[in-house]
Image (spheres, rainbow, N blue to C red):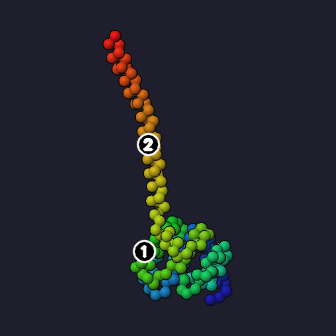
């Protein structure tokens, strides 16, 4: 490969590292092309899975300001560049690795912080962003309903108290 081609490849990988929220390094030794195609589909639309050259990717990661991955660039390496929800992509990798033990998650980086393979598996156990947001919205709605009930209870309690006082006054007025 000519030198300009390598420089272009490094520039492209550097841009992918900079534009992604997360990057997960995997070892794909023993997977077929069909299995890799299935893996790419399982990652969702917000992830790009690429088989990479270790030396060029290491240079690109360092140029992007990520130097915590240097130890992971050994053996056949592929990188999942995640631009959307990292939980969804982590789940896709974890589930695919369960069915295909040849896929090994080496580690990765999430918003500049290095992640071990175990931390990526923990990330995959989280619920997706949409589910967490809907739970938060449900909690807010419940608190608003409780507040509305409290505010509605105050006037009705006042009305009942006034009615009870009228009834008592009428009872006492009728006894005299």
The C terminus, quarter of image: top left
On the image, the x and y values in percent for residue 75 come to 55, 87
Q: Residues within 10 Å of mark 2 (few under 14, many from 20)?
A: few
Residue at (32% x, 13% y) in the render: 175
Residue at (55% x, 75% y) in the render: 116
Above/below status of 122 relative to 6: above
The answer to which image quadrant residue 12 occupies is bottom right
Q: Which mark is residue 146?
A: 2
N-term-proximal mark, 2 vs 1: 1
Per the image, the residue denoted by label 1 is 95
Give the residue furthest to the top: 176
**Visible in this render: residue 43?**
no
Q: Which mark is residue 52?
A: none
The answer to which image quadrant residue 17 occupies is bottom right
Regarding mark 1 in the picture, which secondary structure is present there?
A: helix
On the image, the x and y values in percent for residue 137 come to 46, 52
């Amino acid at each position: 490969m000519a030198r300009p081609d390598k420089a272009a490849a490094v520039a492209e990988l550097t841009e992918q590292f900079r534009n992604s929220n997360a990057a997960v390094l995997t070892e794909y030794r023993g997977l077929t092309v069909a299995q890799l195609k299935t893996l790419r589909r399982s990652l969702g639309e917000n992830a790009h899975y690429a088989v990479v050259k270790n030396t060029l990717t290491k240079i690109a990661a360092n140029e992007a300001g990520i130097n915590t991955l240097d130890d992971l660039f050994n053996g056949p390496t592929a990188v999942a560049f995640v631009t959307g929800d990292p939980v969804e992509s982590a789940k896709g990798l974890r589930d695919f690795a369960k069915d295909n033990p040849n896929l090994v998650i080496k580690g990765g980086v999430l918003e500049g912080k290095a992640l071990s393979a175990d931390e990526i598996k923990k990330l995959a156990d989280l619920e997706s962003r949409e589910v967490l947001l809907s739970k938060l919205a449900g909690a807010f709605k419940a608190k608003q309903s409780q507040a509305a009930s409290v505010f509605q209870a105050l006037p009705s309690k006042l009305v009942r108290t006034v009615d009870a006082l009228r009834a008592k006054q009428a009872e006492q007025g009728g006894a005299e």
